[in-house]
């Protein structure tokens, strides 16, 4: 079988597996997996920039929050319909990431990390500052009217667990297809070229700034999609989603699963979510467990799980 | 016919005049060598031509377009390919991927990226290494890969910065063959220390010293030029 078909088959199997999983999962895990799939979308968006383009942003929480607040505030204050506010949230993330990119991409390396971190901090402080509209730390609960919507003549109830699960799965699938198409084509090759050797890439006729800006914008837009869906499905927005923790999480997920692989962030999100979930049953120091795992990982599996699998066994893994 | 022409080209670093008011002209189809002692300004000059460095003063014209302020990546797209003095490849990617990255911006639109890559690998004689990781190649092969990446872009002007540095004698011979191949379709500008290579490849030679052009002419003229002998050739 050709590598291209193998990878298509693998990704299709993952989606089918996730679809079938909902029929056997107990209620608690059913809800968890719906959340994980949305967070995995965030991680995949982050990984497009980090894993493929080689740019480590420490401010992706602002893109997640842009989607979350774009969608949540428009529902809460303007009574927009759920699909419209979702699109608006995604648009907010696209705009923000493009503008932040124009400025932050003038820097590289550590400076880029700091600039994105600062921008994200500004975004967080803006949310807290306009507490009249956002209720800051305390957050807002989405109104009852926004718990259902009609699309293509069908009514979707967001209070229904199965609906949430499958909408999350749809968003995950769309993201996976978008990322696969991007990284397997010419654009993906140019991202990897920038990651591996930017000066050389420039001399081969690539406008590396434009490539990085495109990567950051797509990455921020996907992250915003995750944030917008999270707000609408779980009916809550709060400033804690804009804190540094939400910038670090997708980094951890990507590192664990394998940065620079399409499925790595998905796997990483699952494992890290359940690792923390299980550890927190036994100890209040559950983040310590996550930290230790991460240190071990960087020491022994610097390429993450799927990165190592690709290196040793499956060279065709995208 | 003139392919590239530079007038009054200067690059100053504070008080240091790395390149100082150089007039330089390249004819279409020629193989030109630039020689000169270390620190003469050779690499700086070609870096100005390909856009890696910004000029302090002067103008550069390529195929009748003023490219003085054109960014490097656009010059590459116009057909100026540059290979680095210190090998600059993608060490963690396969040889094929290395060439494919270059091929995506090729001026040769007659075939697909895959075909261009195969052809370039064949011309460079490294087809059998296509699936190796570039960083694991022997140094000589990495140099050849550099040239293959330049080749696949189907450049109008190929700039080679000390291409034979660190190569063995037999590798140098193969390399000269490759450059002769390339020169059938492209103008070649090379910086070179190995005088045998220069004498066997170059149709014209430019000698630089202290950021200026000391002499220019056929290999014969340069060998017989007393000023060049004094400054550089030594004998």
Image (cartoon, coloured by chain):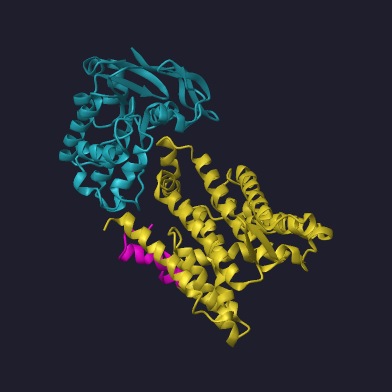
Nearest the viewer among A99 and B166 is A99
- A25, above or below B14, in the image: below
Closer-to-camera residue (A95/B85): A95
- Along the horizontal axis of the image, is A196 left or right of A152? left
Q: Nearer the viewer, residue A11 or B121?
A: A11
**Whole-percent x and y of residue A89?**
66, 53
The N terminus of chain B, quarter of image:
top left
Tell me if residue B147 is in the magenta stretch: no
- Report the residue at 32% width, 63% height from top: A314
Question: What percent of the width, then of the height, locates residue B28?
Answer: 31, 17
Residue ranking furthest to the front = A153
In the image shown, does A34 or B141 lie closer to the viewer?
A34
Is any part of residue B205 visible from this angle? yes
In the picture, residue A289 is in which quadrant?
bottom right
Q: Which residues are magenta?
A: A297-318
> Which residue is most to the top?
B1
Q: Is residue A315 magenta?
A: yes
**In the image, is A219 to the left or to the right of A183?**
right
Q: Residue at x 63, y 83 (%)?
A: A284
- A254 in relation to A25, above or below: above
Classify A138 as above or below A73.
Answer: below
Q: Give the letter of the yellow chain.
A: A
Q: Position of residue A42 (x, y in %)?
A: 56, 60
Q: Is residue A118 visible?
A: no
- Quadrant of the drawing holding the C terminus of chain B: top left
Give coordinates of residue A80: x percent, y percent: 73, 54
Shown in cyan, the chain is B
């Amino acid at each position: 079988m050709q590598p291209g078909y193998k990878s298509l088959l693998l990704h299709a199997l993952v989606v089918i597996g996730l679809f079938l999983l909902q029929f056997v999962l107990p209620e608690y895990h059913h809800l968890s997996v719906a959340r994980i799939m949305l967070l995995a979308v965030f991680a995949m968006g982050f990984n497009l920039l980090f894993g493929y383009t080689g740019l480590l942003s420490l401010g992706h929480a602002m893109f997640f929050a842009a989607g979350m607040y774009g969608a949540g505030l428009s529902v809460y204050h303007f009574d927009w319909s759920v699909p419209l506010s979702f699109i608006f949230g995604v648009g907010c993330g696209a705009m923000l990431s493009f503008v932040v990119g124009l400025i932050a991409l003038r820097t590289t390396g550590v400076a880029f990390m700091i600039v994105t971190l600062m921008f994200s901090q500004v975004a967080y402080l803006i949310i807290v500052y306009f507490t009249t509209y956002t209720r800051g730390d305390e957050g807002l609960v989405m109104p009852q009217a926004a718990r259902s919507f009609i699309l293509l003549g069908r009514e979707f109830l967001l209070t229904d667990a199965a609906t949430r699960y499958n909408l999350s799965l749809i968003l995950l699938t769309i993201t996976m297809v978008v990322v696969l198409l991007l990284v397997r084509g010419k654009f993906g090759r140019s991202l990897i070229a920038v990651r591996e050797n930017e000066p050389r890439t420039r001399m081969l006729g690539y406008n590396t700034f434009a490539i990085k800006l495109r990567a950051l914008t797509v990455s921020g837009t996907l992250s915003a999609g995750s944030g917008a869906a999270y707000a609408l499905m779980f009916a809550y927005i709060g400033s804690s989603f804009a804190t540094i923790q939400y910038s670090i999480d997708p980094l951890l997920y990507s590192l664990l699963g394998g940065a620079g692989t399409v499925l790595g962030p998905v796997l990483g999100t699952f494992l890290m979510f359940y690792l923390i979930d299980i550890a927190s049953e036994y100890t209040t120091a559950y983040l310590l467990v996550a930290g230790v795992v991460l240190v071990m990982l960087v020491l022994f599996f610097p390429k993450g799980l799927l990165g190592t699998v690709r290196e040793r066994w499956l060279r065709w893994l995208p | 016919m003139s392919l590239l022409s530079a007038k009054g080209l200067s690059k100053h670093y504070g008080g240091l005049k790395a390149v100082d008011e150089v007039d330089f002209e390249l004819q279409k189809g020629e193989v030109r060598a630039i020689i000169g002692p270390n620190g003469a300004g050779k690499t700086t000059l070609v870096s100005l031509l390909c856009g890696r460095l910004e000029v302090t003063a002067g103008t550069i014209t390529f195929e009748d377009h003023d490219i003085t302020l054109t960014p490097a990546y656009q010059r590459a797209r116009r057909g100026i390919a540059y290979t680095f003095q210190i090998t600059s490849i993608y060490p963690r990617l396969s040889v094929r991927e290395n060439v494919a990255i270059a091929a995506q911006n090729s001026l040769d639109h007659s075939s697909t990226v895959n075909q261009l890559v195969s052809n370039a690998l064949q011309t460079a004689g490294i087809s059998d290494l296509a699936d190796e990781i570039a960083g694991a190649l022997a140094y000589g092969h990495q140099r050849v890969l550099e040239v293959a990446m330049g080749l696949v872009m189907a450049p109008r002007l190929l700039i080679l910065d000390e291409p034979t540095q660190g190569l063995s004698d037999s590798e140098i011979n193969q390399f000269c063959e490759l450059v002769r191949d390339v020169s059938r379709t492209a103008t070649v500008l090379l910086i070179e220390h190995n005088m045998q290579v220069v004498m066997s490849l170059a149709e014209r030679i430019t000698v630089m010293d202290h950021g200026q052009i000391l002499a220019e002419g056929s290999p014969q003229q340069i060998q017989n030029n007393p000023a060049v002998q004094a400054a550089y050739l030594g004998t």
